[in-house]
Structure formats: C-alpha cells, structure tokens
Image (tube, rainbow, N blue to C red):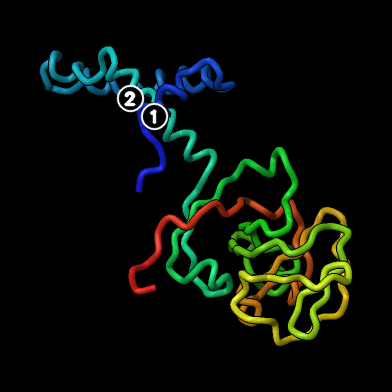
Amino acid sequence: MSFFKLSSFCHFLTSRWMPCNEFLNSLSSSLLDRVVIFASQSNIKREKRCSILRGPNREALKSLLALMMICLMLAEIWFIPSSSMYPTLRIGDRIIAEKVSYYIKSPAVHDIVLFRAPKNLQEMGISREVVFIKRIVAKAGDLVEVHHGLLHINGVAQMEAFIAEPPTYTMIPTYVPKGHVYVMGDNRNSSYDSHFWGSLPVENIIGRYVMCCSRPSYQ
C-alpha cells in the first residue's frame, strides 16, 4: 500500500515552510557524519564507501532519516488483541495512531482513542502501562445514560450505526466531570469501558486512531 510519493515528501522535508526544517537537517546531518566516520574506519576502498554519501544521494538519505524521525515522533503502530471495538476493529488488526493532534485541540466525541489505564483501573490491579482503545461517546459536562438498548447523551438517544449490537444493560445517568471524557467500545456488550469503571481523564490519552493498516486474511 502506498500512502505518498517519496520524492514529493522529500521535497516537503527540505522546504523552508517546515518549522523544524533546520533542526531536522542538522540532526540528520549529524547522523550522516557518524555514518561517514564509521565507514572511513572500515577496509572498503574510499571510492566505493563514499559514493552513496555524495551529492543527491546524501540529500535523499538526509530526507529519509528525517522522515524516520518524524514517523517515530508523530505516529505508532498498534496491535488489536480483543474484540471490544468490533466491528470497527477486529482481533489481529494493526492500526496507526497519531500522537500530536491533542496538543492543539481537545478530544472530540466519536474519536477513537488509545489511553493508559486510569486510576480506577489501577486500583483494580491493572498496570498503568496497559493501553486500551475505545471510542469517545461524551465529553465533560455531558450526562450519559443507557436504557432500552440505546445510549442517551443529555437526554437524546444516539443513533450509532457503528456498534456491533444494541447494549443489553442499563446504566443510570452519569455526569462526565471536567477534564474527562466517557469512552465505550463499539462492541457494547463485550467491552470493559467507562460504564464499568467511570470517566476517563483526558491526560491518560496517548493517541488517536487514524486507520487500520493491516487485517489478518482470515477476518
């Protein structure tokens, strides 16, 4: 699967528009210098070992190194181990999650987010390092309840075409406090989510789901 043309992205990385261009160039240049020093200590002939680090090749390698650093800073690939987000996500899926958008905006209803176990779950013996993935269904200030097979937000029934089936449980009205969101799995009846352990602190969110990049062939 091709997401972009490498030549176009390399031009973008070296353009003056990019705010961190100078930093990336200096950092990638430093890495290249180390590569050259390492190569110079080998027994390969000088002409052969330096040929790939000259002219356009050097600039292309700098851009590639910068791209790798950006990818590590901005996004991660995660594996889905459970069916709590079925049918949107399935066991064995590999997904891409970005890590930067919530530095400039607040999490929104319907965002699918990755988060570390909040205090409520830690008190149940779950490590803080365990990462969950759920969908935000309500934000701070909202009143959440479930009855008659429907999720209600502020008294309004939500039509959710993405869930596996209507919830079979009932949940009393619950207020979402400031600095929190309410999260649920799309597989409502097989998801350990906010209707069990309460609202999620926004500070525990570590990323936002972008896309599924790989799905097992048996799915």
Q: Nearer the viewer, residue 135 or 39?
A: 135
13 lies above or below 145: above
Residue 8, position as x, y percentages in the image: 40, 27
**Mark 1 residue type:** Leu
Q: Under tag 1, what secondary structure?
A: helix
Q: Does residue 51 sit above or below 90 in this rendering?
A: above
- Tell me what residue is drawn at x 76 percent, y 79 percent: 150
Looking at the picture, tell me which residue is in the foreground, 110 or 207.
110
- Residue at 40%, 25% in the rendered image: 10
| 127 lies left or right of 64 | right
Question: Given contact means CB atoms under 8 Å apart, are the residues at marks 2 and 1 in contact?
Answer: yes
CA gap, disc 2 and disc 1? 6 Å
For the residue marked with disc 2, what is the amino acid?
A: Leu
Residue for badge 1: 65
Residue 146, how many percent across, how many down?
79, 79
Residue 218 lies left or right of residue 96; in this view the side is: left
10 Å neighbourhood of mark 2: few (<14), some, or many (≥20)? some
Residue 152, position in %: x, y? 81, 73
Disc 1 residue crowd, few under 14, some 14–19, many 20+, Cα 10 Å = some
Q: Which residue is mark 2?
A: 61
* Residue 213 image-quadrant placement: bottom left
Q: Quadrant of the C terminus?
A: bottom left
Above or below 148: residue 207: above
Task: State which quadrant residue 113 falls in.
Answer: bottom right
- Residue at the image position 46 percent from the left and 62 percent from the top: 79
Which residue lies at the image location 76% right of the left edge and 70% below the top edge?
158
Instruction: Determine whether the residue tagged by mark 2 lies in a helix, strand or loop.
Output: helix
